[in-house]
Amino acid sequence: MEWIAEYGVFLLKSATVLVALVMFVGFLASLSQRQRSDQREGHVKIQSLNDDHEDNLDDFLASVLEPDVYKQRKKDEKKVKKAEAKALKKGGKKDSSTESARPRVFVLDFDGDIKASAVEGLRKEISTLIANKAEGDSVILRLESPGGMVHSYGLAASQLNRIKSAGIKLIVSVDAVAASGGYMMACVADEIIAAPFSVIGSIGVVAQVPNVHRLLKKNDVDVEVLTAGKYKRTLTVLGENTEEGRQKFIDDLESTHTLFKGFVQEHRPTLDIENVATGEIWYGKEALEKGLVDRIATSDDLILDALKTSQVFRVSYEHKKSLAERLGFAAEQGVVKAFEQLWAQQTKRWF
């Protein structure tokens, strides 16, 4: 028995090492191939949220109702559908609640990082919608972003402007955060809807540049920064920064901030831009009072309301992933989850 126990422990250790090795190799492969993911084939996926909602309701009713009651309910629903189909066949017309007369609502998601990487998928989703638009279409964009690079979020905001230019109503829903570049995107919408404790605003510009010149100088290391053009390099990490270069860098930040304020003011003309363009953030209800958003609600509320009157579809762009990438993603998620659990245990801070 002792030998069997030892052998069992040996097998478990071997299996653990093997799984860890496979996940590590997959993780490395995922990192190496992720840079080429945009060049591989992908497709825009359309998913009916009405069907999903009906399936969920059906599962719920099947669980809470008595079998006989549930069975009778299904029979009644079947009779109603049969009668509608018969009336249509005879030349009758469906009322405004039928699928053929319902407007279409498309739900898109944007989860923004510092480079607004999700814009690559977003532009393909938007191009597909515009190419197949119909009268009465609208878009709900579930936006989450703390902001990032100016040019990247400028492009993302321009993509959303394409929706409006095509005559499609755009609603941006913020459940957690739309700050800085995230708000630059949000302000393009016809309507901004935010959850009560979502983070909104941060209409400002920030930049920070570390400088190790004194450390290098202390160790007798010289760094030469050669440029053609007076302001080709204003601040540097390794070289000695000058007051003139520092002031030019600040002027560039102010110029970017002015452009940011002008963009927001153009899309929300009633906003007191000088009052809100201080770099501050506000929670949902405070943002409503400031005029940064139009209504307090969650994206779930919006979608549930739309399901009552519209055909609702979720639109997403999906890349084809290799096996190595899938293994790498699983490993990455495992590491992230473990880190989050460790962080929660160490900080022990809750709201």
Image (spheres, rainbow, N blue to C red):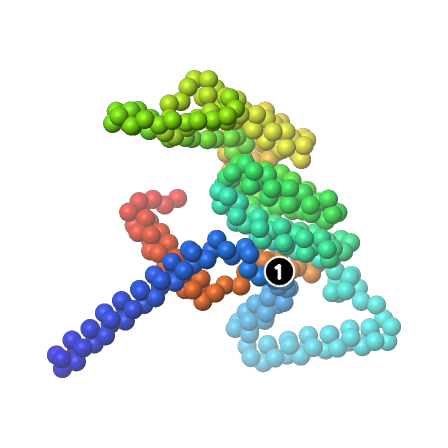
Image x and y of residue 124, in percent = 63, 54
Q: Residue at x 56, y 28 (%)?
A: 257
Crowd class of label 1 (few under 14; some 14 to 19; many from 20; radius 10 Å): some
Q: Nearer the viewer, residue 278 or 101?
A: 278
Image x and y of residue 12, in percent = 24, 72
In the rendered view, tell whether residue 247 sits above or below residue 201.
above
- Quarter of the rendering occupied by the N terminus: bottom left
Does residue 59 appear in the picture of this structure?
yes
- Quarter of the rendering occupied by the C terminus: top left
In the rendered view, tell whether residue 52 sits above or below residue 11.
above
Image x and y of residue 179, in percent = 52, 38
Q: Residue at x 56, y 79 (%)?
A: 67
Does residue 175 appear in the picture of this structure?
no
Classify residue 3 as left or right of residue 164: left
Identify the image quadrant of residue 334. bottom left
* Residue that label 1 marks: 44
Classify residue 155 as left or right of residue 218: right
Q: Dot 1: what SS?
A: strand
**In the image, farthest residue toward the right:** 91
Q: Nearer the viewer, residue 67 or 338?
A: 338
Q: Nearer the viewer, residue 188 or 177?
A: 188
Q: Residue at x 64, y 42 (%)?
A: 158
In the rendered view, tell whether residue 195 sits above or below residue 44.
above
**In the image, farthest residue toward the top:** 243
Q: How many marks?
A: 1
In the rendered view, tell whether residue 88 sits above or below residue 338.
below
Q: Residue at x 51, y 21 (%)?
A: 230
Classify residue 296 as left or right of residue 115: right
Identify the image quadrant of residue 213. top left
Image x and y of residue 115, in percent = 50, 43
Residue type, mark 1 in image: Val
